[in-house]
Amino acid sequence: MAKRSSLSIRIVEGKNLPAKDITGSSDPYCIVKVDSEPIIRTATVWKTLCPFWGEEYQVHLPPTFHAVAFYVMDEDALSRDDVIGKVCLTRDTLASLPKGFTGWAHLTEVDPDEEVQGEIHLRLEVLPGPPACRLHCTVLEARDLAPKDRNGASDPFVRVRYNGRAQETSVVKKSCYPRWNETFEFELEEGATDLLCVEAWDWDLVSRNDFLGKVVVNVQRVRAAQQEEGWFRLQPDQSKSQRAEGNLGSLQLEVRLRDETVLSSGCYQPLVQLLCQEVKLGTQGPGQLIPVIEETTSTECRQEVATNLLKLFLGQGLAKEFLDLLFQLELGRTSEANTLFRSNSLASKSMESFLKVAGMRYLHGVLGPIIDRVFEEKKYVELDPSKVEVKDVGCSGLHRQQSEAEVLEQSAQTLRAHLGALLSALCRSVRACPAVVRATFRQLFKRVRERFPDTQHENVPFIAVTSFLCLRFFSPAIMSPKLFHLRERHADARTSRTLLLLAKAVQNVGNMDTPVSRAKEAWMEPLQPTVRQGVAQLKDFITKLVDIGEKEELDLQRSLSLQAPLVKEGPLFIHRTKGKGPLASSSFKKLHFSLTTEALSFAKTPGAKKSILIKLANIRAAEKVEEKSFGSSHVMQVIYTDDVGLLQTAYLQCKCVNELNQWLSALRKVIINNAGLLASYHPGVFRGDKWSCCHQKDRTDQGCDKTRSRVTLQEWNDPLDHDLEAQLIYRHLQSVEATLREKHRELSGGTEVGTVPTNPGEAPKDPLAALLGVLQDLRLLHSSSLPSSPSSEPHCALDLQT
């Protein structure tokens, strides 16, 4: 059993932001921090005070997190980025909102005294008199303090105050992980205050000291316990009067917290077996569960339920069979061919999720070069005469301004070239398409042809395939390449228009160039020759795509199963040290890295022969490196054991915070079951004769910060988590259990709920009754697990904080 928390985050847009640039505008982007740890950076939207992002993220993190903060920043090319304002949502606030926070939130000013982070390790002890009891406060160490100086560190010291007296530790220079081990004694006088205040400060020679955070301890509580020791989370100084808020604008957010208690795999087996039995039998079985689940699922959560079901069946090797069942159910209730798969049904939503999970790498291979070319050319493209702006095109020839007709003709030529290149790439990609995707489209094509066999409907099977492949997969990726990880930044206005027109052309091809699609926008007529040619190409492509026999499907899947699945790849910079002693020099070398379920490998170029850097089973931690170590905040370290069992570290530099967190997430997910994972690490480097973070001189010294192996970003190519998907399905079914019981009474005429058959191969005569019995058993198992076992996190006496 394990407790898991996740945050669903959608950063929608901002409005009425203040102007930070001399042009009267700003270049805003958002940074998302969980407990002061940056985990997300949105794209920058240039020259606007009302930016739209529309970016969605799913973050998995330990249940002990405290708050998530959204910082709106203004990007500057020549100076430090300006902070516009922030929105902070505490864990308690999110936990009190079952449907999450949705709406506009006012940005507040960022106060340096409130921007605290880190923890301090204290030992508190009360010693008896005579003449009076004494309180001993030992300041042992601190970790993850806020860097306040330009060198990326701080010069921290601690001030301990009690009953009007104050004592201070020594100053530790250039460290966010200081160690003091200094003890202070105070007399506990009768009638004295019950609060002990421990403050951390950054010492500055010239300016005033910077506040790093404080802890307030109840002395009476310590007196009752005689002695307490632990890590205390530093808190901001809230004694100041609240400053009046200026007009900093607003941020529209959708944030939802989910806490799940995931039971062991065996607990979910009855539920999984029941659902799998339903899918294996298809329309030949009782056929109750999947239709009832769709009927009882509201529109707002249908996408989520479809994704969970799809991942569950994908993990069981039944994704094709599950989708085939949904196709048959949808076709059974569709009478008009032109309305097929046009609604947001469970079949449509499940197929969308399936293509993103199983076909994203394929999409990148086909669309990636086309999208890159559009971004690189940055041509002005417009086909709608009412929107043509000749001044945007510039001049040609001897400073002769182009006419509207010339602009339209050049735009048509550009779009024809892009559309032709895309269709050619698509036609060449049959063998690159995953076997399970091809087999699923084969079933879709077959079922639609069986349902609409007439000659007048000869295009319907092709349109059914393109309705998913083109309209719901390729076209959205063309219009929003960043949301499909094809680009790191949003397109500017000119490029966005080109992408939109290209997506419209792809939709026209996908609709088989029907008269209805042509009539909508007559100004798309210049593309018609390419569209008509594209229809023929697309039909030929689909014919080859669905022409895959079961033997070929199994052979392709078997050949893929013999290869270690690729988890992530891309260019990184690896740290290399030359020489030894004081003359040693270091640098970063760019290489192409590949992470599979077996090893982290590298090569000079993407197509070159790969060399294994680290075997996956040897990795003990993947963590960030503090900025001052290499002068960059985008460096990670992979800690592993070498052939003789000694710990070694590889330092890898990424180009941005998003890439850093994506690589850390990928590494943490694939090593989650490794033996000997570290609970602590050094965020600095061992340089000279000491660690740069905590200044300890023993290279094998225990780490000065805790590892964060459970903080990950969800990606489309994540390893499947069968138990989590089963738990999410159970939670949804539990939320509609009353409706399911009512449905059962309606179908069975009031028969009592039955039980699950003991023989796994035997199909239940009343699947819905069996499902209700399984839900009841799971509810009892969850109830018995409420007194949860202690967390596997490193010991933290967080309950001591006030």
Image: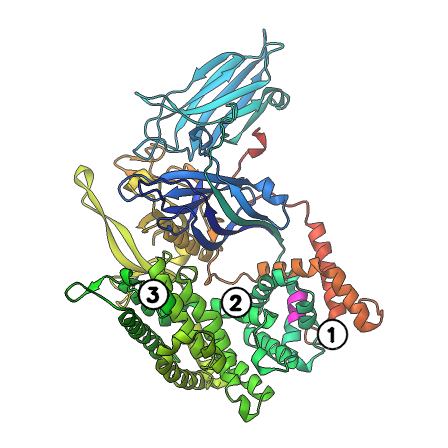
Q: Amino acid at mark 3?
A: Val
Based on the picture, tell me whether residue 129 belongs to the magenta stretch.
no
Q: Secondary structure at mark 2?
A: helix
Q: CA distance from mark 2 to mark 3?
A: 38 Å
Left or right of 285 on screen, residue 512: left
Residue receiving disc 1: 764
Which numbered mark, 2 or 3, is in the foreground of this view?
3
Nearest the eye: 217 or 386: 386
Q: Nearer the viewer, residue 375 or 802?
A: 375
Does residue 773 appear in the picture of this structure? no
Give the extent of the magenta segment: 270-275
Of marks 1 and 3, the one in the foreground: 3
Mark 1 packing: few (<14 Cα in 10 Å), some, or many (20+)?
Answer: many
* Residue ranking furthest to the bottom: 455
Give x and y (percent) for residue 585: 19, 43
Please rate how many residues cluster around mark 2, counting C-alpha atoms within 10 Å: few if below 14, some from 14 to 19, many from 20. many
Residue 509, image x, y percentages: 42, 79
Residue annotated with mark 3: 388
- Tell me the kind of residue under disc 2: Ser
In front here: 334 or 588?
334
Left or right: 377 with respect to 668? left
Does residue 236 lie above or below 250 as drawn?
above
Residue at the disc numbered 2:
353
Q: Residue at x 74, y 69 (%)?
A: 768
**What's the CA distance linking mark 2 and mark 1?**
29 Å
Q: Earlier in the sequence, mark 1 or mark 3?
A: 3
Mark 2 and 3 residues: CB-CB less than 8 Å, in contact?
no
Q: Is residue 272 magenta?
A: yes
The residue under the point 43% across, 60% down is 483
Q: Amino acid at mark 1?
A: Pro
Q: Residue at x 72, y 78 (%)?
A: 286
**Quarter of image, res 404:** bottom left
